[in-house]
Amino acid sequence: MPVSSTKYENLCESIFDLDKNIRFAGIIDKMGKLVAGGMRKGIESLEPKEERRKLYLEYALRTAMRHDFDSTFGRVIYTLTERERVKLASFPLGEQLVLVSIDKKGFHDKIIRKVLDLVSAD
C-alpha cells in the first residue's frame, strides 16, 4: 500500500525539527527518485543539481545490495558515511529510504537515535 507524499513530507519536516545541523532530509524510492523532502531552507546543496539523481541512485543501489546479507547479519537498521565535508545517514523505510545529511559539527549519534525513533514510529 503506497504511503501518501504528505506523510513523507511531514516525516521530513519532523526530521528537520530534530536538530539544526540536519542539512537535508529526503525520501528516496528504490529507483533513486526523490519522492519527498529536500534541502533545509536557507542551505545550499554541496553537490550540483545534475549530480543529485546520481547520489540518490547510488544510495538506492547500496540499499538493495545490502539485502543480500539480511539472512546472515540481519536487516540494516541504518548506515552512516562520514566524508570530509558532510555526514550522510540512510534509514530503510519499507520500500523507501530516508536519507539525511548532517553538518560535520553535528553530533550524528544523537541525530541518528532521534531519526530511528521517528522512522520506527511510522
Image (spheres, helix red, strand yellow):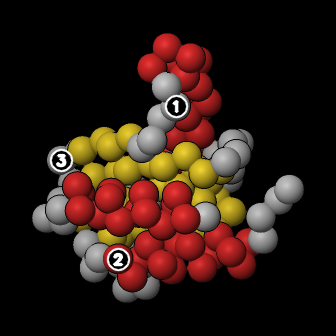
Precedes in sequence: disc 1 or disc 3: 1
- On the question of residue 48 being in view, the answer is yes
Q: Tag 2: Cα neighbours inside 10 Å, few (<14), some, or many (≥20)?
A: some
Cα gap from disc 1 to disc 3, whole angstroms: 28 Å
Q: Tag 1: Cα neighbours inside 10 Å, few (<14), some, or many (≥20)?
A: few
Question: Position of 93 compared to 99: left or right?
Answer: right
Q: Secondary structure at mark 2?
A: helix
Viewer-side label of 1, 2: 1
Pointer 1 and pointer 3: residues touching (CB < 8 Å)?
no
Q: Residue at x 26, y 72 (%)?
A: 21
Instruction: Pick out the residue farthest to the left.
Output: 105
Question: Position of 114 compared to 120: left or right?
Answer: left
Residue that label 3 marks: 84
Q: Amino acid at mark 3?
A: Glu
Residue that label 2 marks: 18
Precedes in sequence: disc 1 or disc 2: 2
Label disc, if present, on residue 75 of the rendered structure: 1
The quarter in which the N terminus is drawn is: bottom right
Residue 55 image point, x, y percent: 50, 45
Front-lying residue, 120 or 91 = 120
Q: Secondary structure at mark 1?
A: loop
Residue 110 image point, x, y percent: 23, 62
The quarter in which the C terminus is drawn is: bottom right
Q: Is residue 71 above or below residue 64?
A: above
- On the question of residue 86 being in view, the answer is no
Viewer-side label of 1, 3: 1
Precedes in sequence: disc 3 or disc 2: 2
Residue 73 image point, x, y percent: 45, 20
Instruction: Pick out the residue farthest to the right.
Output: 1
Question: Position of 121 compared to 24: left or right?
Answer: right
Pointer 3 and pointer 2: residues touching (CB < 8 Å)?
no
Q: Residue at x 78, y 71 (%)?
A: 4
